[in-house]
Amino acid sequence: MQTQQPLTAYLVDTVTRERLAFQYNPNEIVDSKSTTYATLVVPGMSHPRYQYVAGDARKITFTVTFYKGDVRRQVAWLQALLYPTHQGTMLQQAPHPVLFFFGELYPGIACLVREVRAHYAYLFDPATLQPQRADVEITLEELVSQSVNAREVRR
C-alpha cells in the first residue's frame, strides 16, 4: 500500500523556475478583491451617484512559518521576489512573477509578490543569532491579462 504525501503549498518563480515549498501550509488565507467607483455629486440629490471605473487587483494574503533549517535563506528567497534585476545602473527586468500553488484552491495562480513581512521571534541560534523561526506574511496580487466578467468568476 502506497501512502500519499501531504500536499504542501509552494511558490514558483516564473523566470528562474525555482520553487520554494512551504514547510507548513498556511492556517488561513485571505482572498480579497475590491472595485473602484467614481462618486458623482449631483446638486440637490440626497446621495451621490456612482459610476463603475475598474476593478482593483485581487489580493491573496497568508502567513507561513519556517522553523529550523536555514530560515534566513528561505525568507531572503521570498524577499528577493520584490526586487528588480539591474545591469549596472540600468533596469534589466522587473521583479519576477510567481505561480502560487495551494492544492485545488489555487492550482497555479499567476501573481506578483507585493509584500513580504518577516517576524523573527523566540528562537535565535545562541552562537550566531541567526533566526530559527520566522512567521512570514505574504501578499500576492493576481496577474490577469484580460478582463474577467462575473460569470467566469462563478464557475
Image (cartoon, rainbow, N blue to C red):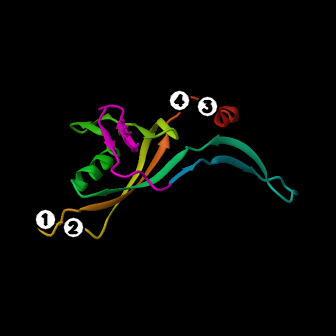
> Who comes first in sequence, dot 2 or dot 4?
2
Q: Is residue 122 above or below residue 116?
A: below
Asked if disc 4 and disc 3 are in contact, CB closer than 8 Å, the reply is no
Residue 100's x, y, as percent?
43, 40
Residue 63's x, y, as percent?
42, 56
Q: Is residue 10 magenta?
A: yes
> Who comes first in sequence, dot 1 or dot 4?
1
User: Residue at the location (25% across, 55% down)?
Assistant: 71
User: Residue at the location (65% across, 32% down)?
Assistant: 152
User: Residue at the location (27% across, 50% down)?
Assistant: 74
> Who comes first in sequence, dot 3 or dot 1?
1
Residue located beneath label 1 in the image? 128
Mark 1 and mark 4: Cα distance apart in space = 46 Å
Residue found at the very far right of the displayed protein: 44
Q: Is 95 displayed left or right of 107 in the figure?
A: left
Mark 3 and mark 1: Cα distance apart in space = 50 Å
Q: Which mark is residue 145?
A: 4
Pick whichever, 55 or 74, lies toward us.
74
Q: Which mark is residue 124?
A: 2
Task: Say which amino acid is labelled 2.
Answer: Phe
Mark in the foreground, 2 or 3? 2
Mark 2 and mark 3: Cα distance apart in space = 47 Å
Looking at the rendering, the stretch of residues picked out in magenta corresponds to 1-28
Residue 120's x, y, as percent?
30, 64
Pick whichever, 89 or 105, lies toward us.
105
Residue located beneath label 3 in the image? 147
Q: Is residue 121 above or below residue 7?
A: below
Asked if disc 2 and disc 4 are in contact, CB closer than 8 Å, the reply is no
Mark 4 and mark 3: Cα distance apart in space = 7 Å
Under circle 2, the secondary element is loop
